[in-house]
Image: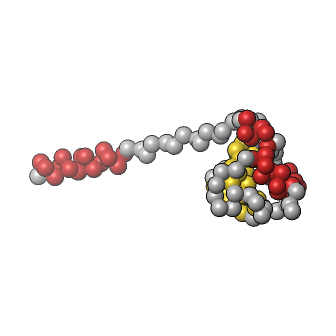
Amino acid sequence: MRRHLLVAAALLLASCATAPRQAAPEVPEIVQTPRTARSGLAGLTAGELVGHFGNPALQIREGTSLKLQFRGRSCVLDAYLYPSQGDNTLRVTHIDARSPNGADMDQAACVSALENPS
């Protein structure tokens, strides 16, 4: 009987515990690294990117972020947009550029190739 009371008390106490609260996700600050600054895309909105390159080949939304992918004959450009600190407008914070086979590529060269398709 005593053992049953101990188990019941432990279960009662466990049911009173609250789940740990998850902290709000940190929003990355828009920082122009030398590579993203060189591409000239850091800080642009999704609408500005679409106006510049046309409709993206791929659009992925994850939480509050957005990934837009633009493809050309010679490169693939991934632009990652996160809410800005002041007004929550999604802006480019990071860029990845690669050749169609997956090898890293200079961002400025990829931007140029997408702007001037041959």
* Residue 2 on image: x %, y %: 12, 48
Q: Quadrant of the C terminus?
A: bottom right
Left or right placement of residue 47 versus residue 81 in this view: right
| Residue 31 figure quarter | top right
Residue under the point 73% across and 39% down:
35
Residue under the point 58% across and 41% down:
24
Left or right placement of residue 22 versus residue 85 in this view: left
Camera-nearest residue between 69 and 65:
69
Residue under the point 82% across and 62% down:
55
* Residue 91 on image: x %, y %: 76, 45
Residue under the point 23% across and 51% down:
8
* Residue 106 on image: x %, y %: 73, 47
| Residue 44 figure quarter | top right
Up-down relation of residue 25 to residue 62 (above or below): above
Q: Is residue 23 visible?
A: yes
Left or right placement of residue 44 versus residue 67 in this view: right
